[in-house]
Amino acid sequence: MQVTITYLGSAASFAGRTATVLELRAPATVKEILEAAGKECGFRFNPTAWAVFVEGRGVPPEDWDTFRISEDCELTVLPMLSGG
Amino acid sequence: MGKVLRVNLTEGKVDVEEISPRVYEQFLGGRGLAAFYYYNEIGADTDPLSPENKLFFFTGPLTGVRLPSTTKFNVATKSPQTGLYLCSNSGGDFGPHLKFSGFDGLIIEGRAERPIFLYIRDGQVEFHSAEAFWDEETGPGTEIVKEIIGEKRASVMIAGKGAVRGADIACIMVDGRSFGRGGAGRVMASKNLKAVAVWGRGKIPLYRPEVLAEFSQEAMRKARASRPVHTRFGTAQYTGILNELGCYPSYNFRTSVFDGIETIKAEYMEKHYKVKNKACYYCPIGCAQVCEVKEGPFKGFRSDPEYESIGTLGAQCGVADFGAIIAANNLCDEYGLDSMSAGTIIAYAMECFELGLFSKELIGRELRFGDGEAMVEMIRDMGEMRGFGAELARGFRYLAGKYPETIPYMMHCKWMPFAAYEPRGFFGIGLSYGTSSRGACHNVGGWTIRDELLSGEYDRFAIKGKGVLVKRIQDTRAYVDSLGICTVARSAMGFNDRPSGNVLELVTGVDLTPRLMEIGERIYTLERLILVREGVSRKDDYLPERIMKEALPEGPAQGKVLTKEMYDEMLDEYYAARGWDKDGIPTCERLQQLALDWTGQTL
């Protein structure tokens, strides 16, 4: 399956890019997708500092290793927002 | 520790009082204690600028302890800007040093005959004349204080030129941080009190210091690892994200996509202006981004603008020149003005000018959206309290009385100007603004952005569930503000809406962790009782017509509007969750449940 990853806001500065497309075997968990993305861009996205949408819906960090994706989708990575 | 320093400026008298353990158990510290004292000592009719108003400063049980970002202390007073209860918190070193001096709290009452400043040193209080530098700006004024007392390491909280000249939006600056909102600086100046300096060499007693030291090491590591974006970009990180989501308020909330975003984003700030990071007391994150303008009309200006200042002085005013934002933010700090109020009020004035409601003759210049130089000059006029600037610096409550035809363009709740979050882009933040204890505020009212966007449980454009969400976030923040820690670092110590861990017990010997959310709810409800006593009810919990009638014109949130019907549904859910009646008054039953029936306020 194809996962299009968008790095939103400051996430792009850490990833060194604004978007990427990964080819992955389905199904894959959010955690596995982020590990693949991390290898690709050279930056590890840990769950305390980063947040994820899948198709526009937030996936909380405690669900990253259970939330499975089985078909092409869009995943957005952004900073874990913590007040401003 | 349990000691409060009460200084009566009229009589030149100093007393030390004790706080009972029962009060600590009910209200924790910081914001909770400040609300408790305010409830008991400030009447509904107290004039904010009279000697009868007081400033209640309180630290929390964790302030000054060697844990991540234990920098915070709180103030409660009656606001000259809104005419209502004000709570505010500040970073800097003052809170820790007040504790090192032997005090959990400081109460200022009365009015000195002549301008003075106070110096608190290891339990003793000195009174010094401030006549020679009464009109001084906050930076030079702080240096003068330190020179006079002969202690460069002292922490100083100070009212600036804006406060002493009568700006109702004047803040109290504290070591470069501030009690920003609501005019606490003006209250201080009304008492002829220019500054308070503190230096303490005592130690905070700890229950289990060795175990705490181990916990602290791990908490510092966690805090640093969980906030790399705050370290690199500060709160400015939200600017680009919110604009991409189509909810970055711009041009006085006329739209929510800023056409000048590329030159005010965090990445642009980092590349062209950032000089270094600055950290508050014992903070491993260091989120303040010190910036300097190296060229152009604002060359030499230096400040550390937060997301809010960038939003209100930048996008709200249509200003895309980051140098102008740095300059305006610097001037706000030096004059001692709330940058959020200043920016939102100038944006209102810009719109009124463009609509022909304010003339060039009245303002003293043309004041158009996007004109950074005019915006900066307006800040100078507000700080100097001259010309039309003197009127703008009085705030919306004053301006509404003088220019009632401009009320539709005032973005406020309970006279507190909006923050830089768009209620039509996050419906929950609209409810936060409307129900905040100090008027439109995303901190006290509840920062719903993360939950509405990231938790997966909410749709930011949905109504259901937002009342319960806002209550939960408000209660969490109320106890966090009472602990004496910064909200950015709190998760590293287990302080969220399901608080866990035992750090409170390690520090104090009392494990209040299981009761923290209940304490937060008690504090929030007491604050509401104060507001009710001051005349507030449901009618005051609404948003401006622009939010309730004008749809967003562009971007991902195009067409969104938060109508009165939708808002009423959220508000009803909120009141029900809080155990308040349909008019927003806490019920007897809820007061009993929260052990607040001693307040004697019944339906």
Image: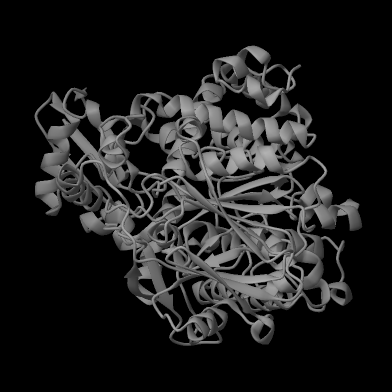
Q: In which image quadrant can residue B259 be found? A: bottom right
Q: In which image quadrant can residue B340 be found? A: bottom right
Which residue is more in the foreground, B190 or A54?
A: B190
Q: Is residue A59 left or right of residue B210?
A: right
Q: Is residue A42 left or right of residue B158?
A: left
Which residue is more in the foreground, B59 or A14?
A: B59
Q: Residue B36, percent across and down?
A: 60, 38
Q: Is residue A73 left or right of residue B326?
A: left
Q: Residue B324, percent across and down?
A: 56, 75
**Count of marks, rendered view:** 0
* Quadrant (top left/top right/bottom left/bottom right) for the C terminus of chain B: top right
Q: Is residue B370 visible?
A: yes
Q: Is residue B271 above or below residue A21?
A: below
Q: Is residue B286 above or below residue B485?
A: below
Q: Residue B500, percent across and down?
A: 28, 29
Q: Residue placed at 48% from the left, 49% from the top?
A: B3
Q: Is residue B322 above or below residue B508?
A: below
Q: Is residue B561 visible?
A: no
Q: Residue placed at 75% from the left, 55% from the top?
A: B80
